[in-house]
Image (tube, grey):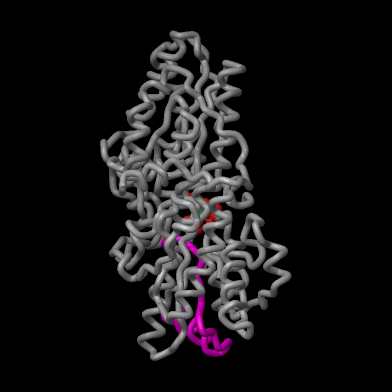
Amino acid sequence: MFSGGPAPGGHNVVAGLYHALKELNPNNSLSGYLGGPQGLLDGKFIEITSSLVDDFFNLGGFHMLGSGRTKIETDEDFQKAMQVCNNHRLNALVFVGGDDTNTNAALLDEYLKKHGQHCVIIGVPKTIDGDLKSSEIEISFGFDTACKVYSEMIGNICFDAVSSRKYWHFIKLMGRKASHVTLECALQTHPNLTFISEEVEEKNESLSDIISTVADTVMKRAQDGKNYGVCLIPEGLIEFVPEFKSLITALNRVLAEGRSTEHLPSGQKELFDTLPDAIQCQLLQDRDPHGNVQVSKIETEKLVYEMVDQELKKRAFKGKFNPIAHFFGYEGRCSHPSLFDGVYCYNLGYVSAALIQNEKSGYMAGIKNLDQSVEKWQPIGVKISKMLIDEERKGKIKKVIEKAVVKLKDPAFEEFKKSRADWQIHDCYQSPGPIQFEGTKKAAITKTLALERAGQK
Ligand code: FBP
């Protein structure tokens, strides 16, 4: 079962799992639940055949089965899931998903054990956001490809900026709460400005600090005759700006209680009222089934440039400021997998089969030594319940897998910090070009993973 947003390589997980199961026993059969966890609860599935696997091998997207964000949450959901496991006589169930999905996997495993039911539950780490990782899970699949797709487009924009010399580009990048995607794309393309949400939070920077940084940079570059630039914004930025963080927490509570924004605590109500109508509506949109604000729907890139424009007017800036907003999100999630993700995912399918064979219920499939050649990769299983922490969701404390956000001591952040002042003023743009899908050498990995692995040695 796929779950959550698509990520490049998902179909190869199915292929690896199918081939491994057939190698273990030709009588094994594999079914795919349709449309994510809802398909499981409704008992809707298809039989996965060798020709289906061939048709979808190395193909982006999750459309072999579809996906969804239904949460298996209530006692009734768990009961239904258990019934399906029994009725369909499942020996095992593999959840291909992110932190919330793998949390669901751990809870279902616990529920089945408590009710004396036997079905091996396995998780596979998926998300382009790169925030499902630990000391053992080096990276979730999809991050590599998505960063390469976005970096190709950002590189093109950087070269356009320096060629046409008249636009400031504000690019919001997917990644939800974590800024790994933005950080990796910055390392690959060297834009003039990059905000990292986790740093903003750590330094307690307000929205007006962010706006001042951009306005200062626009003015400094204008002095050198550069009325252009590129600024990367992680989609979760708004949630990390302290005043917005408290506003969103308060909004979540008020909405969960079915009350209007009139009931926001004072201070937060005033901040909410100062926001443009569009941003207010975006902040009020339905939370996803896991209680997260849908940050992909908040146009932070526009909010930032509109406020920068106002700030420049206040400062009586005489130069030109022509901003253009972009959002790179959905374009990166269904690309064909990079060589790295293609091979990684196929092997994750094999590791899942090995965990099933060894009855390792409640484990996540993983592979270590991903920076080395495939022969040196090491299959592992990680107990999911060990990754769970308490977190507030929809106003209640829940057990969830901790999101691995960017830490300011991370090697990738340290590397970025060394160069960013230079990138801000000088044009150091890099354009990595399109993804290479084939090669005789080891697949190129992201700079984030290479730096992290080098730091561990
Ligand atoms: P997953 O965590 O499910 O892999 O999804 C990642 C993501 O692409 C985020 O980067 C983004 O904020 C979100 O999905 C968008 O959600 P939706 O697909 O519901 O619009």
How many numbered marks appear? 0
Q: Looking at this view, is 249 or 123 the one in front? A: 123
Horizontal side of residue 188 vs 393, given as left or right: right
Residue 157: give x, y in percent of width and height: 58, 28
Horizontal side of residue 257 vs 146, given as left or right: left
Residue 232, visible in the rendered structure: yes
When the figure is inspected, residue 107 is found, relative to residue 291, above or below; the finding is: below
When the figure is inspected, residue 317 is found, relative to residue 110, above or below; the finding is: above
When the figure is inspected, residue 444 is found, relative to residue 166, above or below; the finding is: below
Q: Looking at this view, is 143 or 348 the one in front? A: 348
Residue 373: give x, y in percent of width and height: 48, 52
Q: Based on the picture, tell me whether residue 178 belongs to the magenta stretch.
A: no
Residue 216: give x, y in percent of width and height: 38, 18
When the figure is inspected, residue 132 is found, relative to residue 148, above or below; the finding is: below
Stretch of the chain drawn in magenta: 75-99
Specify the quadrant of the image occupied by residue 31.
bottom right
Residue 305, visible in the rendered structure: no
Q: Based on the picture, tell me whether residue 94 belongs to the magenta stretch.
A: yes
Q: Quadrant of the N terminus?
A: bottom right
Specify the quadrant of the image occupied by residue 66.
bottom right
Residue 313: give x, y in percent of width and height: 44, 16
Q: Residue at x 55, y 88 (%)?
A: 89
Q: Looking at this view, is 202 or 300 the one in front? A: 202
Q: Residue at x 56, y 35 (%)?
A: 326
Q: Looking at this view, is 156 or 377 the one in front? A: 377
Q: Residue at x 29, y 34 (%)?
A: 205
Q: Residue at x 35, y 34 (%)?
A: 415
